[in-house]
Image (cartoon, rainbow, N blue to C red):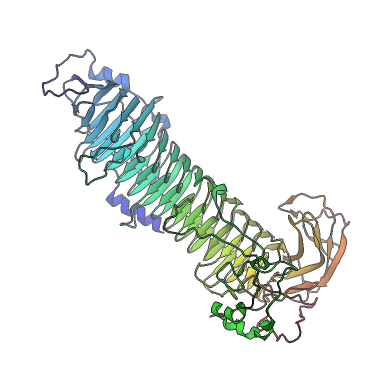
Amino acid sequence: MMTAMVFAVMATACSENNSDSGTTTSEKMTTTISAGTTDNTEPAEIETTESDETVAEKNSVLLSSSVKTSDSELFSDRDLNPDYSSPTTEISFTGKSAEIIGSGVTVDGSKVTITDEGIYHLTGILDDGQIIVDADKNKVQLVLDNASINCSNSSAIYVSSAKKVFITLAENSKNYLSDGTEYVFADTEKSEPDAVIFSKDSLTINGNGEIEVTGNYNDGIRSKDDVVITGGKITVNSVGDGIKAKDYVAVANGELNITAGQDGIKATNTDDVSLGFVHVEGGTLNINADGDGIQAETIFTSTDGIFNITSGGGSSASTKVHNDDFGGFGKGGGFGRGGGFNKGEMPDMPDNFGDFNPEDFRNFNPDDFEKFNSEMPDNPEQLAFSTENNDNTSDTVSTKGIKASAEINILGGTFNINSADDAIHSNADVCIENGNITLETGNKGIHSDNTTTINNGSVNITKSYEGIEATVIIVNGGSVEINASDDGFNASDGETNQSGMGTYSDSIMLNINGGTVYVNASGDGLDSNGDINISGGTIIVDGPENGGNGALDSNGEIIITGGTVVAVGMSDMAESPSEKSTQNAVSATFDSTSDGGTLVTLSDDSGNEIISFSPAKQFDNIVISSPDIKNGTTYTFYTGGTSSKSEVHGLYETGGYNNDGAEAGNFTAESVVSYVGRQSTMGGGFGGGGMHMHGNDDGTHERPDGMPEPPDIDGGHGFKQPRQ
């Protein structure tokens, strides 16, 4: 796995030496410098009555009870242990002056420069001053103990050279750092530093105190190496990015409260695939960002922690719109996926439409639409289009919750994400092993270009345009709940043609092997440009109320070999499981549309309750696949009854049906798929959204006069693209 490679490389290239840094001993000295001093005279030496031991004892803070441990090589012992019981130097700020006790420090006006390795204890207020660390390849620890530093024209803390800098927040301290709105650069060709805390080298923030960082110029905290956080309460308010590192950001503990005009946390290295990542294994991250909440150029990984992220103003800021009336033309032209005409709203077609041979659909090209496009209705109000805004323009600000160019690995943690764009977005893979994830988004709940895998944990997408989208979607366990204004699951590679007939691709698939899945979608419930394979778990789909979408929609086949599947919606585009399935199923279309909340019960000829389900929305079709549907047994549907048992997402525990519903049809299971009522034979014909016609109870269909036999009708799929 790539994460292992990242850590292996970092252990060699960037790991921190675990030994404590050395301290220098020197004669105690007190220096007072006022702002504006220009002479070079030696400061007067003042004797101090405090011994080294007294000073050490005074500043000793034993933090062993709060020291965190980690197995990750990203965190050294010193990162995790913020001990500062033996300070090298005391630095006290009093307005525009600095008082120094110790060595390793030079002062020029209100600028304090640290040049040697050591532990520096900082207190007081420095008004329009700056701490500069210029210590070559040495380690420096800055202990902020009720320190306040403002610099009007540059960084409050600027690390120009060091091996590593530790900023330790002293126990019970409150510290404040801020900058101005304009910076003055020594070299006009450069634009650095550009953050309140700016480091050219590795930076660690630890301790148990508090710090408030106000970035009026650009970023709050920035390192051109890495940023490691293992403790403290860190509040960042910045007009730019909140916390930015080139190589990586790693968080083991602490509380981060970030308000950013750009991204909340980001790692930017694009030159080395082993870097550019964000790793979190604990702490609380509260992020409100105008851009992305967390952005990694390579990998995002969490093993624990609490994430409260709002990006781009949240889901309410999205302009994504889904119109259910006629989706085909809105997605690439032709009779597209997820659309179709609403029931009874088919506009008058051109006179020559009957001359268009359905056989031509086998090799349909969107350009062929010109054969009858010219005589489509002139009044645009006769057609309602499905619209999907293109958010991928070059000048659009990315407003995703968590974004990574490579992998997103959620191994644990609690996530509450409210995003204008995708809540979780990867240009490669998403893997969820555990955790509690709640997503509200104006676009996709989870998107990956390649594979999204859910092995365990809880994923609750309370609001989305589309719930989960990837080329391959795999659910092996856990709990998944999706509420979507368009498709719930959308297995698509973003390239395969979804217009016209809806091209089939054998590299695209939706596989559900276990867990509990609930989908409430206004578009297609389960949608795949390839096959849908279900081998286990409990899958409930409250599908669309419009006739242009289906609860189940596959450009290939729906193969069910295990689990329990209940999918309801309108019959216009309803699809049935494939005859390749090994578990029996039934597709029932009722004589009339029922309101949401109407109980549907399936019982066998002995009165045993197989399924009782109460859909959330109006419906006239239900597809059920269950291991309890046995060959040779007769089953009866009842509607409008009641149950005394409890339910989850409308699916009731069996054994509570009160036998008070009205009989709505029956069947004898004699094949893998049985039918009740008139069935749609064009359900997936035009890529999941297009024209339809109803069939008879036995699955045969009636065609208008002069319309030839459809080229490939299979289990309710209708016209299908041949597999390439």
Image coordinates of residue 536 in percent, x first then y, are: 64, 63
Q: List x then y, in percent, for residue 312.
A: 49, 47
Say which residue appears at 29% left-offset and 35% top-offset: 155
- On the picture, is 176 further left or further right than 121? right
Q: Nearer the viewer, residue 715 or 701?
A: 701
Please determine whether, in this image, residue 14 is positioned above or below residue 592. above
Q: Position of residue 210 (x, y in %)?
A: 41, 29
Residue 279 vertical position relative to residue 135 in the rendered view, above or below: below
Task: State which quarter of the image contains the N terminus.
Answer: bottom left
- Among the 4 quarters of the image, the one containing residue 688: bottom right
* Closer to the camera in the image, 711 or 78: 711
Residue 672, image x, y percentages: 72, 74
Count numbered badges in the picture. 0
Image quadrant in which you'd find residue 566: bottom right
Is residue 17 among what the camera can see? no
Q: Residue furthest top?
A: 49
Judge from the rendering whether residue 140 lies leftward or rightward of residue 254; answer left or right: left
Q: Is residue 698 visible?
A: yes
The one nearer the camera, 451 or 155, is: 155
Residue placed most toward the observer, 214 or 387: 387
The outermost residue toward the front is 378
Query: Residue at (42%, 55%) from the top-left corner?
Result: 395
Residue at (23, 29) in percent of width and height: 111
